[in-house]
Amino acid sequence: MTNDLIMSSVRPEQSGQAAAVSETAYELGTAFGTAILGSVLLGFYRTGLAGTASAGLPGGVLEAAQETLAGALLYARELPGELGEALATAATDAFTSALSATVRSLLRLRRISTVDRTWSSSHPGVREEQDRLRRDARKDPARCREAR
């Protein structure tokens, strides 16, 4: 539901409360979305880096490199020659793959959500309930406005 639709569906004296609820929901959704997608991305990155990082890394470097891409690139700069290059390549490849996998996961969830909304809005039970509400609104419009 867009913010305009929310704001147009409330009485003017309730617009402040509606705006506050809408803003709070937006902020929470953004924070939760960032946290969840960040966790998914980090999980894919760690798994990908562990699977592609070359053997022979000094103790603790792989674990530290799995925390962030920036950390992995800093460690790669400190390692000698081909070992550093291999870590940098593995980290950037793991991050790119993780980002791609996270976006694909998000798109799958969005597709499932869209299919679910489409199905539920075309489901006979939902249509019957919507029709009943419309009939009630036509019979007693004042009561429907009060319920809002």
Image (cartoon, helix red, strand yellow):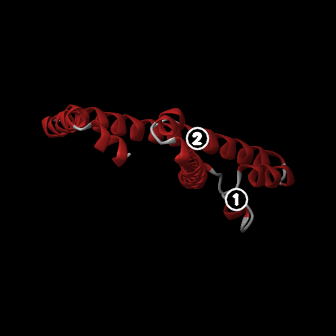
Position of 121 compared to 107: left or right? Answer: left
Q: Position of residue 127 (x, y in %)?
A: 18, 34
91 is higher (above) or lower (below) than 134: below
Identify which residue is drawn at 34% across, 48% down. 147
The x, y position of residue 128, in whole percent, is: 14, 36
Kindly check if marks 2 and 1 are in contact, taking CB atoms under 8 A apart as contact. no
Helix, strand, or loop for circle 1? loop
The residue that mark 2 highlights is 99
In the rendered image, which quarter contains the N terminus?
A: top left
Q: Where does the image place residue 10, in percent across and percent down from the top left?
A: 47, 42
Q: Residue at x 34, y 38 (%)?
A: 112
**Mark 1 crowdedness (10 Å alpha carbons): few <14, some 14-19, many ≥20:** few
Question: Which residue is pictured at 74% across the width and 53% down the height?
Answer: 72
Q: Nearer the viewer, residue 105 or 51?
A: 105
* Label number found at residue 27: none
Q: Nearer the viewer, residue 47 or 15?
A: 15
Which callout, 2 or 1, points at the residue further toward the start of the chain?
Answer: 1
In this rendered view, identify the residue nearer to me: 78 or 22: 22
Amino acid marked by disc 1: Gly
Q: Nearer the viewer, residue 33 or 7?
A: 7
Task: Give the spatial CA distance, label 2 vs label 1.
Answer: 27 Å
How many numbered marks does the figure carry? Answer: 2
Residue 68 seen anywhere in this rendered image of the structure: yes
Residue 125 picture location, percent across and down: 14, 40
Locate residue 100: give its quadrant: top right
The kind of residue tagged 2 is Leu
Instruction: Give the residue pinned by disc 1.
Output: 56
Q: Secondary structure at mark 2?
A: helix
127 to the left or right of 6: left
Q: Residue at x 31, y 40 (%)?
A: 142
